[in-house]
Amino acid sequence: MPPLNEGDLMFMPITDPAISLPQAIDITKKQNTAILAAPEVAGVVAKISRAETSTDPAPVNMTETIVSLKPESQWRPGMTRERLIGELDVATTLPGVSSIWTQPIINRINMLTTGIRSEVGVKIFGDDLRVLEERARAVAAALRPIRGAADVYPEQVTGVPYIDIRVKRD
C-alpha cells in the first residue's frame, strides 16, 4: 500500500547525547533557516528534546521539526516531494548530526509501536557497547547500497553522561 501523503514533513535531526541546550538551539536555528529558504515551505516549528508526557519517547538529543508545506500548486515547476526532501536534506546537513525525513502522523505511530524513528529499522541487542557499535556500522554499510534505502545510519552508541557521587558519611 502506498504511503499516505500527510501534506507536511517531519525532519528529525539527532546529535550527540551529551549536547548542551544552547548547542541544540543553535543547530535547530541554522537548520530551520535553511528549511525556510525553500519556496515550497510555508513554516517550520521545532521541539528540542522530550515533551513532559509519557507518550513522548524522544531522547534528549533529538529534535522534531514539523515542516508545513504550501499547496503543490504553489511549488516550483517540476518539483516533487522526493526532490524537495533531497534539497532540504542537503541544505540541513551539519557535521555530527544524523537526520531523517518522514511525516508527522506515521512517525508518531512508528515511534510509539517500535521505538524506531523510521518505517524500517534494525535493532541489535547486547551488553558490550563497542561490539554493538561495530555491528551497527557493519549493518548500516551493508544496507546503504540497497536501492531505495535512504537515511541509513547507525545510532550513536554512547554511555550516559552522569557523575557517580559516593558520599563518605564519616
Image: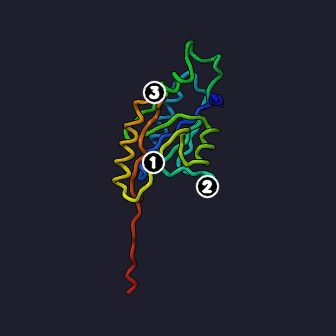
- Colour approach in the figure: rainbow
Q: Secondary structure at mark 3?
A: loop
Q: Which residue is mark 2?
A: 52
Q: Quadrant of the N terminus?
A: top right
Q: Amino acid at mark 2?
A: Glu
Give the camera-side residue of 106 and 169: 106
| Label 3, label 1: how far apart the Cα atoms are | 38 Å
Q: Quadrant of the C terminus?
A: bottom left
Q: Residues within 10 Å of mark 3 (few under 14, many from 20)?
A: few
| Label 3, label 2: how far apart the Cα atoms are | 39 Å
The location of residue 123, given as percent across then percent down, is: 47, 48
Q: Residues within 10 Å of mark 2 (few under 14, many from 20)?
A: few
Q: Secondary structure at mark 1?
A: helix
The residue lying at 57 percent from left, 23 percent from top is: 81
Which of the two discs, 3 and 1, labels the residue nearer the N terminus?
1
For marks 1 and 2, give the one nearer the viewer.
2
Q: Amino acid at mark 1?
A: Pro
Q: Which residue is mark 3?
A: 147
The residue lying at 36 percent from left, 42 percent from top is: 138
Which of the two discs, 1 and 2, labels the residue nearer the N terminus?
1
Residue furthest bottom as drawn: 170
Q: Which residue is mark 1?
A: 22
